[in-house]
Amino acid sequence: MTMNGNSINDRLDRMMATSPYIRHWGLAITSIELDAKTLIMRMPWLDEVEGEDNTGYWHGGPIVSLADTAGCFAAIMLDTRNAGTVALNIDYVRPASGAFLVATAHVRKAGRAFSTVEIDITDASERLVAVARGTFYFMQA
C-alpha cells in the first residue's frame, strides 16, 4: 500500500528519523501489519531507563513513553495525517527487565477524527509487563 507515492513504512521511518526524542531512545518499528491493524515497536535498554541504580529494572516513564509512541504511530499508519495523544492509560503488570522492550500496538477503532489503540508491552523474555489503551486524534492538514 502506498501513500502519495511513498510506502507507509518509508513515511513512518521518515517521521521517526526527524524526532530527536525517538532517536535518543533508539525506538524502531520492527513490523507493520496493515490487515491486522498492528504495529510493533522496540526500545533498547539504555542506562537512563533504569528505575534505581543497579537493579536492572526499567522505570515506568520510558515504558509509558514507548506505549504512547507505538500507539500514536499505529494510528498514523492507517491514516494520511499526523496524530497526537488525547488520552493514555497504562497498567503495569510486573517489573520490566532485560535488554529491550517490545510494544505491540493494535488499532481497535480507526475513526475520521480519533483512533483507539491497545498496546501490550513485553520484555526481552516475552513476558507481559504493561498494558495500555490510548486515544489519538488526527491533525487537520
Image: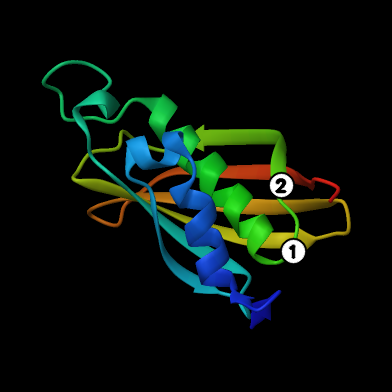
How many numbered marks appear? 2
Q: Quadrant of residue 111?
A: bottom right
Give the labeled residue for mark 2. Answer: 83
Question: What amino acid type is highlighted by mark number 1?
Answer: Asp
Is residue 105 found left or right of 110 in the rendered image?
A: left
Is residue 112 found left or right of 54 in the rendered image?
A: right
Where residue 49 appears, as percent x and y from the top left, is 28, 28
Contact check, label 2 and label 1, Cβ < 8 Å: yes
Q: Looking at the picture, does residue 40 appear above or below residue 134?
A: below
Q: Secondary structure at mark 2?
A: strand
Q: Look at the image and tell me in which quarter the N terminus lies.
A: bottom right
Identity of the residue drawn at 67% across and 43% down: 134
Tell me the crowding category of disc 1: few under 14, some 14 to 19, or many 20 or more residues within 10 angstroms, Cα based: some
Q: Quadrant of residue 8?
A: bottom right
Q: Secondary structure at mark 1?
A: loop
On residue 61, the disc is: none
Q: Looking at the picture, does residue 78 appear above or below residue 82?
A: below
Q: Residue furthest top?
A: 53
Is residue 130 found left or right of 89 in the rendered image?
A: left
Is residue 39 found left or right of 20 in the rendered image?
A: right
Where residue 138 appears, as percent x and y from the top left, is 79, 49
Where residue 84 appears, as percent x and y from the top left, is 70, 40
Give the labeled residue for mark 1. Answer: 79
Q: Residue furthest front?
A: 5
Question: What amino acid type is highlighted by mark number 2?
Answer: Ala
Colouring scheme, one of rainbow, by chain, secondary structure, one colour: rainbow
Of residues 104 and 14, the one nearer the viewer is: 14
Q: Is residue 92 visible?
A: no
**C-alpha distance separating marks 2 and 1:** 9 Å
